[in-house]
Image (cartoon, rainbow, N blue to C red):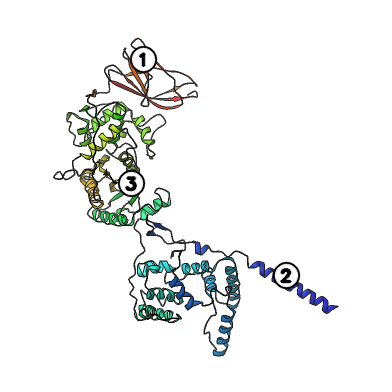
Amino acid sequence: MFRLYFATKTQTVTAIGLIIFALSLFWPVSLEKYEQESLTMYDQNGELIHIERNKFDCWMLKSNTIDPQFKELLINFEDKSFYFHPGVNPFSLIRAVWQAISTGKIISGGSTLTMQVVRLLNPRPRTILNKLIEMHTALRLSLQFSKDKILNIYLTLSPYGGNIHGIRAASLYYFAKEPNCLPLSYKAMLVAIPQAPSNLRPDRFIEKANTAKNKVLQRLPVHSSEVKEALSESCIVTPTPFVKLAPHGFIAQKHGKIKPNCLDKTHQTAVNELIDNFVQKLPEPMNAACIIYNLKTQQIIAYVGGVTSTHRLGGNDMCQAKRSPGSLLKPFIYGLAIERGLINPHTIVTDQPINLKGYKPENFDMQFNGELSIEEALQQSLNTPVIQVLNQIGPGYFFDWLKHCKITMQFYKSSSKRPGLAIGLGGVGISLQDLVQLYALLAEGKLLNNMAQNWVTQTLAQTPMPDQRLKNPGIAYKTGTSYGFRDAWSIGYDSDHVVGIWVGKADGTPCPGYHGRQIAAPLMMQIFNYLKITPIILTVETSSSDHKLRFKSTEKNEFKITVPQTNTTICVPESGEVFLSTNEDGPTLWYVNGDYLGKSSKCESVYIWKPDNAGFYEVTATNSKKETANCSVQVTREPF
């Protein structure tokens, strides 16, 4: 009876133990270390252009595809029964134990590739208990993952000296090539190094590494002519630093500022060199940034946020920094004014001292040129004419129009103020990337109507070159210099590309004597010459009428809107009315935010406007003399 009870109890415990063991095999194996690949950036052709160390401070790249020749070398050298055993090879273990007993020392370890993967995933001290845990985990790996997946984990985690892990990282560092592009002898060396990575590093112990690679080749079952040639060949190693072609682009892509896989390795390499050579001639800490946008693919193909030197504050990405654009917004002011019918390509403006609501802009050379065409005013980048035009458009309206272009701007406004006329001369913060995007929309004809678009492009394409001896080759470009010589800009486009350049200091301190035309435009031309210019050819549609703008040099304006007063807030209930009137009798055309509202007749003293929504509005009135007046108002629905 006792024997029967004991036997039954033993069987029960054994059965329970087997069940627990079987269930434990399904306990998930953590692949956290394998998943921590080095952060990478690839170009539009799938080529690696930037890599950073992973969270374990290691260089490690996954081997998504396994070269068949490399697989054959590894299996024959490490574990010929890899595809047949369940993660643990009992015959290898028995052989290892017998060799240890008979010789008194360890000849072979009996580990399979799968067991090596376990050690790579979770290194432990070599004890009998840990060996049993390792075997158990190897069984779990074999049950939960395919053989090729296990092989991939090994090829990703295997050590190659220092903080280099995996055949792909090792191949790029030691041989500057992807593993599948290596000859047989070099592949054999990569198989051998993980056996003793500290002693077989080919950059330090090339002779030992060559001897080890021959051992790998000799394990092959068939020695073909290729194998014999590889045995006689000595590998040459030239360590190559890991590629870091786009440090700022890498961070920009990580934060969603640029699209993945958009850059072009060839262009990125060339532009890096051009920027480096250019910046070396500038006094520290001046730096330069560049973006190239392909108009056909609608992708950024080169992104240089600056030379990554600590002496030049290179950690700052100047493609994303919000800086004053200087004169770069002038083409859009003129283009918008043409689109709205306030001026036309034949309009004559007067470059003279002005005082508009206390704002007294001056030209760069502190001179005034009298009457001239708007084309000349834009090409010479004069300040007073563009501010007079902006005053008719309304700076608040222009600011809102820019926001509709899906660019972000930095504007420090108080609770009662809207952007002022200074926005036309750079009184707003915009990044180089947003400016390139804005000019790309202009180049693609997505911002203005055909007449305004073509006029702006042709005018910019006829702007003289920085070197007056050269003719403009068909590049529409504009330069800019922010207040105090803090930022020098040049942005241009031909039929294929938009190139944007910033030059200055990352800390925003002045760079006296450096301005856009003198320093940024020549660099832009270097890059266009590298890209090979595709000239712009346009036929401009113009009106035959001559619409002259007439401005007063003081803030007083004989024709003005009297109700409502500018920069006021009006509480208007739903379906409520706002009365509009001027200081003149006679027919008046009314516009709100550039849209035609209606006409008040000669006998009407006021015009009634019903705002659809609350918000900021630019109200414009035009009299029979084609003079205009503007006012900015805020409409609210709640009592103010």
User: Which one is nearer the viewer's eye here, 587 or 466?
Assistant: 587
Please give the residue where the numbered disc 2 appears in the rendered image. 16
Q: Is residue 92 left or right of residue 381?
A: right
Q: Nearer the viewer, residue 114 or 505?
A: 114
Q: Is residue 508 above or below residue 175?
A: above
Is residue 163 visible in this depiction of the protein? no
Q: Is residue 559 visible?
A: yes
Q: Are marks 1 and 3 in contact (CB under 8 Å)?
A: no
With respect to residue 240, does 609 lie above or below? above
SS for callout 3: loop
Disc sitting over residue 296 in the figure: 3
- Local SS, label 2: helix
Residue 128 - label: none
In 3D space, how far apart are the residues under numbered discs 2 and 3 (Cα atoms)? 69 Å
Q: Earlier in the sequence, mark 1 or mark 3?
A: 3
Kindly identify the amino acid type of the residue bearing the numbered disc 2: Ile
Q: Residues within 10 Å of mark 2 (few under 14, many from 20)?
A: few
Q: Position of residue 512 (x, y in %)?
A: 22, 45
Q: Is residue 321 above or below residue 119?
A: above
Place residue 602 in its image quadrant: top left
**Mark 3 or mark 2, which is nearer the start of the sequence?**
2
Q: Mark 1 highlights which residue?
A: 600
The image position of residue 199, as x and y in percent, is: 41, 78
Give the residue furthest to the right. Answer: 1
Q: CA distance from mark 2 to mark 1?
A: 96 Å
Position in image of residue 337 (x %, y %): 29, 29
